[in-house]
Amino acid sequence: MKLKGNNVVYNNAIALGGDEYALTDWTAINNLIPTNRWQPALLTTNNRQFILTGPGGDVIVPIHLLGGQFNIGGVSGVSDQNAPIISGSICGDRSGFDGSVVTLSSVVQDNVGHVTESCQAGFSLSTLQSVQPFYFNRPIFSINSQELIAAFEVLDKKIPGQYFGSISVNNRYYFLENGVVTYRQLPSQSFTVQINYSPEFITDINVDTQKNIVPVYDTSLHMASGSVDFNVKATGYFQTGIQMTFDPKKEYFLNKVKNVPDDISLGSKPIPYFIRCGECSTSSIVENGAIQNLAVSPVKYEVSSPTEMFEFNLTVGYEGISSEDIETGTYMDTFTVIFEEIM
């Protein structure tokens, strides 16, 4: 599993619906006594919390063990239209047999969701000849992505890396041997979870919202130039940095403002401007009023080491504007930048 910022990726799990999953891999089961009738069951686990341990400490994660699946391994002629071999606590309504896999879901879980009451299938399976009852099994569990993210957010030290944890999983099954009901408890198995944690998130972006560009005139060439820095301050937790998205369809021009308050109109001589970031992956974002090809994709500012805060500048300005193209008055424009974590 991978947890990067607020994004959870399940690498070795099959979605069963909602927040429920089964492992992609099955555990092979060998050397079971052949029988022509059997009944699967779940046993309680001794674990009441699922704790992962990693470089930032221990994390109690909201992973709930719900039940298990038994795979009959392609055996044909299997019927589940039989009464149970033994009576007792019957597993939940979602338990059943689909022709190849028996699914058992416990009725009762404790406050962290682990099976606390043994239960049996409400049916038994039969074959015409005695065969090994099943060949593979795996656990069923639930996990809520938002709760998982919240569990890692309370870490005192949000250190990236691998976080491991496991709990024991116990199953048994009942079967007929020479007409006598008996059972076999499977060896305890470990349900192991590994999360590759990368705590990348943004808490706040503080940007200068309005600046004045003071023109500098070249009287000999009759040109005007000017620029100003917009400071960007990012807080959160960053291993990689942030990325910025600019509107590729916008025309980046300073437009002359009429004398009427709040009335901005395109003057006869709009001034094209640039946006540059000397420390970014693309230093030239906008030139002469147009976004550059490399800046159509997100522009990245990357940090050299994990940090909770950093600052950089976006430089906005114009250069080489002929005095003949400038009218007396005030020019202005606005543009939007979308800031995101680098995922």
Image: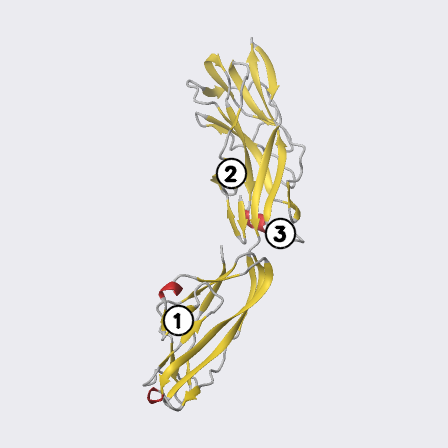
Q: Residue at x 57, y 35 (%)?
A: 66
> Separation of disc 2 and disc 1 at Cα?
47 Å
Q: Amino acid at mark 1?
A: Val
Q: Which residue is mark 1?
A: 286
How far across and how far down the image is residue 92, in percent?
A: 55, 32
> Separation of disc 3 and disc 2 at Cα?
27 Å
Q: Given this view, does label 3 or label 2 mark the residue nearer the observer?
A: 3
How far across and how far down the image is residue 103, in percent?
A: 51, 29
Q: Residue at x 49, y 67 (%)?
A: 279
From what the image shows, is residue 137 above or below residue 243? above
Q: Residue at x 44, y 25 (%)?
A: 100
How far across and how far down the image is residue 57, in percent?
A: 67, 47
Decide which of tag 3 and tag 2 comes sooner along the chain: 2
Q: Given this view, does label 2 or label 1 mark the residue nearer the observer?
A: 1
Decide which of tag 1 and tag 3 comes sooner along the chain: 3
> Separation of disc 1 and disc 3 at Cα?
37 Å
| Crowd around label 3: few <14 · some 14–19 · many ≥20 (10 Å) | some
Taking depth in this image into account, of 7 and 310 the one nearest to the observer is 310
| Crowd around label 2: few <14 · some 14–19 · many ≥20 (10 Å) | many
Q: Does the image show residue 114?
A: no
Q: Which residue is mark 2?
A: 21
How far across and how far down the image is residue 163, in percent?
A: 61, 44
Q: Amino acid at mark 2?
A: Tyr
Q: Mark 1 and 3 residues: CB-CB less than 8 Å, in contact?
A: no
Q: Which residue is mark 3?
A: 159
Q: Residue at x 52, y 14 (%)?
A: 34
